[in-house]
Amino acid sequence: MNSGWSSCKEILIIRADNMGDLIMSSPAIRAVKETSQSRITVLTSSMAAGIAKQIPEIDDVLVYSLPWVQAKESARPESFFELVQTLKSRKFDGAIVFSVYSQNSQPAAMLAYLAEIPLRLGYSRENPYELLTHWVPDPEPFSVIKHQVRRDLDLVAQIGAFTGNESFVLEHYDEKAWKLTSLKLRKMGVDTIKPLIVLHAGVSERKREYPFASWVKFSKSILATTDCQLLFTGIGSEKTLTDKLAFAAGENSFSVAGALTLEEFTELIRHSALVVSVNTATVHIAAAVKTPVMVLYALTNPQHSPWKAFGKLFPFPVPQEIQSKNRIVQYVNERYFGDFSRIVEPEELVEATLKILNNELEEIPELIMIQETTA
């Protein structure tokens, strides 16, 4: 690694976003771990803390709801200063801030600065001056757009951190873990001998929703043409949705939202024939465990397609009235997706599903770029 970073023993990674964001940063975390042999602590949100335990390169996890990141709960303002003191007491040698191009990394850099962490790496569109000791001017999205994984890998490459394995890796909890998971599923009526298809309809933002009626039509067609069983997954708060979907789809469909731990959910995906999901953390877990995936991809950010995954991706536009107010996100929408109009029909999903089940797989593109709109 570059001078200074090569002697680091304790490195803090700041990635306080959702579960999928942390998974996408994991190859870059691996690069830091392999190159520096440091102890890696991740500062993340409550939404991502669970998956951090499955990423082998992470040694420790700090959980905090940073006020500049959307979170389920808000932290007390005074607790921010408590966090600064906690970080200061840990005596980190370096801090790395991962971000998407529509975020400003300087609040996180300020946190590391106040904690007196001597080395601080991150992207910034504006000059951060003393906040970052290793400033990488952010070219995205005005000059180039990269997949989030590539963006993070390129960041740590600036300090000489590299890895020979750029894939996602999640801890495998051996066959005993699957036996326990399948036992729980069988108690719910699932025949785990038959092929399983995971359907994940829940979203954290309404702009990513695929219509309820289309989910039902697709599900009924798959049940009529295959011997698969459909498992509607989600978090506990999505159980009402998955109950309604499973009831509407009919026999051989099951609502399992909130019934599985994150480790069990990972094992279910690992042992499924296919995952069908909106663009959420579920598709990144599927990519990590090498399960084919079919993604209903709302065009909120072209950086977040499943990395090194096989299956099919169906992009669809976000209605204008619920699009992001972030001007950088709007710029990308206007430049690349402004004229894009498409309805993803259930019949298309059925056709793609049958091909995937027949092992007719294609690699999902690294970036979802429709076309550049010219003035």
Image (cartoon, rainbow, N blue to C red):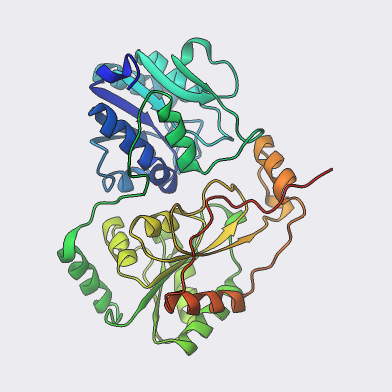
Q: Position of residue 348 (x, y in %)?
A: 60, 75
Please tell me which residue lies in front, 155 or 185. 155
Q: Kindly give the residue lying farthest to the right in the view shown.
A: 375
**Quadrant of residue 308 within the rendered picture:** bottom left
Where, quadrant-wise, is the C terminus in this rendering?
top right
Horizontal side, residue 119 vs residue 201: left or right: left
Q: Residue at x 26, y 34 (%)?
A: 34
Residue 208 makes an appearance in the image? yes
Q: Is residue 312 above or below residue 229?
A: above
Task: Answer with the quarter of the image where residue 141 lies.
Answer: top right
- Could you tell me if residue 92 is visible in this image? no
Residue at 52% x, 51% y: name it. Answer: 366
Note whether 235 is above or below 41 in the view shown.
Answer: below
Extreme-left residue of the structure: 176
x, y percent for residue 181? 23, 68
Q: Residue at x 43, y 79 (%)?
A: 358
Residue 46 % position (x, y): 37, 42
Eyeballing the image, is 192 above or below 309? below
